[in-house]
Image (spheres, coloured by chain):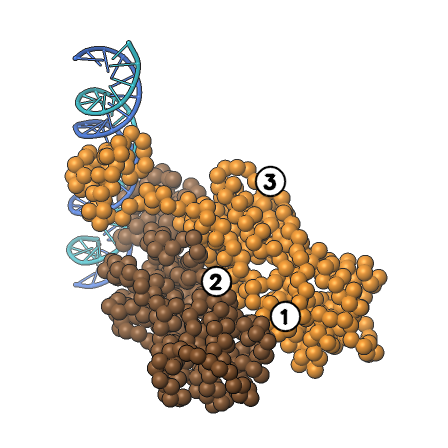
Chain colours: A brown, B orange, C cyan, D blue
Amino acid sequence: MATLAQIAAEASVSEATVSRVLNGKPGVSDGARSSVLTALDVLGYERPARLRQRSAGLVGLVVPELENPIFPAFAQVIEDALARRRFTPVLCTQSPGGISEDEYVESLLDHGVAGIIFVSGKHADTRADHERYRTLLSRGLPIVFVNGYAEGLDAPFFSADDRDAMDLAVSHLVQLGHSRIGLAIGPKRFVPSARKREGFLGALMGSLGQSAKEAQSWIQEGLFSVEGGAAAARGLLDRGATAVVCGSDLMALGAVRAAREAGGAVPADVSVIGFDDSPLIQFLDPPLTTVRQPVSAMGAAAVAALADAIDGVPVPAHEYVFKPELVLRGSTGPVPVPVTVAVTG
Amino acid sequence: MATLAQIAAEASVSEATVSRVLNGKPGVSDGARSSVLTALDVLGYERPARLRQRSAGLVGLVVPELENPIFPAFAQVIEDALARRRFTPVLCTQSPGGISEDEYVESLLDHGVAGIIFVSGKHADTRADHERYRTLLSRGLPIVFVNGYAEGLDAPFFSADDRDAMDLAVSHLVQLGHSRIGLAIGPKRFVPSARKREGFLGALMGSLGQSAKEAQSWIQEGLFSVEGGAAAARGLLDRGATAVVCGSDLMALGAVRAAREAGGAVPADVSVIGFDDSPLIQFLDPPLTTVRQPVSAMGAAAVAALADAIDGVPVPAHEYVFKPELVLRGSTGPVPVPVTVAVTG
DNA sequence: AAGCATATTGCAAGGGCTTCCATTTCTTGC
DNA sequence: GCAAGAAATGGAAGCCCTTGCAATATGCTT
């Protein structure tokens, strides 16, 4: 690493001038500035990052995993939007036993990020401690959240309307004549799962006039994966469900598999609705009817808010809820000829 | 930011001791060290990164995009392997009009990465200038490459055996009775595409005894996307192909779509084989027969080599070629009753 | 052409950090 | 209990960087 004295000698200016150039201070002529920069290059000395105006700064993007294709989809949309604003995105993916959200945040902080976008992070987990975010906010670091909500955090949230999504799904199924509709959903400690439960319960009670208790019995919890969806769906099918609404497309894939393993066809015997509408879903067998999360709009809004916050424009710290959209494909159909099954519960 | 003097006062030690602790120098007792660290915390001063032994360092992971699910798959495998070795992965995704590989590399360098893994980067593009990599290597930065090859770079390469993959695919189709087999492949400037071409030509000439010129006529180029695959496949179907081998699963999806748009069923009328075997492919309609790239093995090997290089263990700088595997599913079938079509060319 | 205002520059002072070295403290063997 | 060696520590010198200030250069006005 070169010293100021070396650079000053090479550029034939004083150390003071070099110092001023390196720190972007005013009071240096263009000529002097450029001879300092030339001297830096001659000495093979890397210019400090702030001298290169290329990037408006680093922005961290924290996502929980990449296996569910909705996360690469969010990542791509958000990275594009960040790049368009000259930010340099840094994608951080957690993995089981790997690096935690907190460790990533710390590393991002070390590298002087201008802001962080959390997608389905710990803010979506009601059992997690949200103090970590308060600490970030009190330091003045701009942060925004996608899909999840935590009370009392002075930052903007961008979420899909999970309750509405369930309403759309259930209404569609009811219209097709279904009345034995189940929900295969992730653990309720996660905000989006909890909200989908609520929406689902409300829809069953509203559209089908079920009691809260009965509606409740049509919910099965499972992990956020194909296997989790299959396990939850099996429980619902055993109970005689003719349609299964799922918390994610991946879980819906599991539900389709479970239905087939039980000897049923989709959609002839069992209708399945997913959630997310990740890119490849349309090519599935059968093409999945699903509730589309407006990924582009959400990502763009989150980036816009973060950019404003970084520029010092105050961003109203409330939750922006995006309306989902039902995408009709081939995994839902009219209720099959009713099969009378004795069911307890 | 606290000064040494402040910290020294808080910890009741000399500035010299604080300096030694902060720089990890020897000659400080455990007691003194911990009282300095406590003082840091009391003063709310962030410990410099090197004091936290949590991470063995940053490692850059550069992938071209996230839309083709093979890239998230590689990213996940490589990040897991890095995390297990206590490295902190930094995922960099390029995007059209967004941030280029070079810009990411520069940013990574600024932040002192210990090494970089390039997946399907510019090293796979024969028309790109590979001087950039030589510069990195001459600086002593450990780098490794996945899927692609460039002559004269003193670094290890980890690739799937593209030629072999085409051999597997063509042999399978020939066994099913196909003789009008087309290849829908990406631009030949990319090494994996060029190699698949070679493998495909060799297989057609070997298994079917075609002339080089004839075999050549069964190749259609298209972009690496569903649309690109569809466009290339349309050309092949027009020429009377009963089977289409594709350069990626995404292109295969396009081929299936093109076949259906032309009124053909898969696999009854047209057989389609993909490449990659990305996670969701098994759920597609029809479940895609594909040549599996050994993603886990390749990712693990690349990380192991990089870790060795970072530890100063010299890594033999040659190309490690991984054998792919044919995964039989439902998109290939026996050749349909031969339809005689007049074809020119 | 002289005078004035402003911008640029280097000197030198000052502060922060590192490191050499002498001193103190601790450990260990007798 | 004592001495010898090793480890730990602080003082102070020295290096590097920043910055106030004065000197100089430049350009504009009268």
Report the front residue among B44 and B273.
Answer: B273
Q: Amino acid at mark 2?
A: Leu
| Chain for numbered disc 3 | B
Residue that numbered label 2 is attached to: A66
- Disc 2 to disc 1, C-alpha distance: 22 Å
Quadrant in which residue A205 is drawn: bottom left
Q: Amino acid at mark 1?
A: Pro
- Disc 1 to disc 3, C-alpha distance: 39 Å
Q: Secondary structure at mark 2?
A: loop
> Is residue B45 something that shows in the picture?
yes
Q: Secondary structure at mark 3?
A: loop
Residue at x 53% of width, y 88% of height: A338
Residue that numbered label 3 is attached to: B316
**Crowd class of label 3 (few under 14; some 14 to 19; many from 20; radius 10 Å):** few
| Chain for numbered disc 1 | B
Q: Give coordinates of residue A166: x percent, y percent.
A: 41, 80
